[in-house]
Amino acid sequence: MIVLFTDYGWRDPYVGQLKAVLAREAPGVAVIDLLHDAPDFNAHAGAHLLVALVPEFPVGSVFVCVVDPGVGDPRGAVAIEADGRWFVGPDNGLLSVVAARARQVRRFGIAWRPERLSASFHGRDLFAPVAAWIAAGRPPAERLRPIAALEGSFDASDLPRVIYIDHYGNCWTGLRGGLMSGEETLDVKGRRLPHRRVFSEAEKGEAFWYVNSVGLVEIAANRTSAAELLKVGVGDTVRIAGGTAGALH
């Protein structure tokens, strides 16, 4: 199984071009579109979003991960195996949280370069072929060189910021729900939001926080957009107050 995680969006030809390479190099292997609206240019948010979404996928899955505003610069290209799943993408921090939280991890620099390598589309020309070969059971051992550490790296601890806004206007944070007892409030843009277990516990139009289906603390509002109501965007900070979790900054 090949899993796609990008900031390419759906309006442009990039996803289709990526899939064409995968079909050519790994015919018959299932391709899953996990996400194509990861926050644009934001590898930090993407790293925390990616690690939260991984557990639903079986061991052996191969992820093509592209949030790569520095494409064409000297940043490296890497493949990592983390707890039996593979991740292929830029060495800009996007894969660093997955690697840091894994129990077992192997890191490789991609030494291979194709004859045709666009300066601005490494997802199609470099990452997709390598991921396809791994998924098809033909890992290109001679084209991968072991490395001790990733060059691009983010702090793997919980991130007290908004990392994603879905089409409902719900704001996912980089805080794992296991950190919270449910007694806390969440400070967001000068508002102190209470905890609700599910949407139906909130009044219509009430903003609150809860633990979403992938285990992250999410800011929501019942039957309206929390992002619009609170004027919240990706990158905005949040702070935990009260309860047993203490404060994060």
Image (cartoon, rainbow, N blue to C red):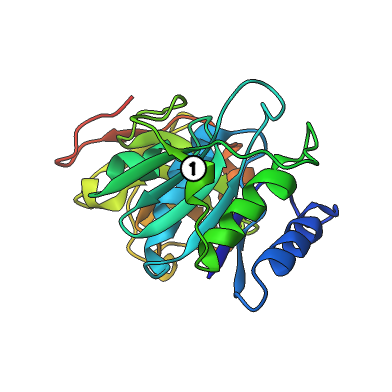
Residue occupying the point 14% across, 41% down: 244
In the rendered structure, the answer to whether residue 161 lies left or right of residue 71 reads left
Measured as percent of width and height from the top left, residue 54 is found at 42, 58
Q: Which of the 4 image quarters holds residue 22?
A: bottom right
Quarter in which the C terminus is drawn: top left
Residue occupying the point 54% across, 31% down: 235
Measured as percent of width and height from the top left, residue 69 is found at 68, 30
In the structure shown, which secondary structural element does the residue marked by tag 1 occupy? strand
Judged from this view, the residue extending furthest toward the left is: 244
Can you say whether 231 is above or below 35 in the image? above
Give the amino acid type for the residue marked by disc 1 in the picture. Leu
List the residue tagged with mark 1: 144
In the rendered structure, the answer to whether residue 241 lies left or right of residue 73 reads left
Measured as percent of width and height from the top left, residue 15 is found at 76, 57
Front residue (pair 145, 81): 145
Residue occupying the point 64% across, 69% down: 26
Q: Is residue 163 visible?
A: no
Can you say whether 155 is above or below 36 in the image? above
Judged from this view, the residue extending furthest toward the top is: 74
Front residue (pair 236, 63): 63
Local packing at callout 1 (Cα closer than 10 Å; few below 14, some 14-19, many 20+) is some
Measured as percent of width and height from the top left, residue 191 is found at 44, 35
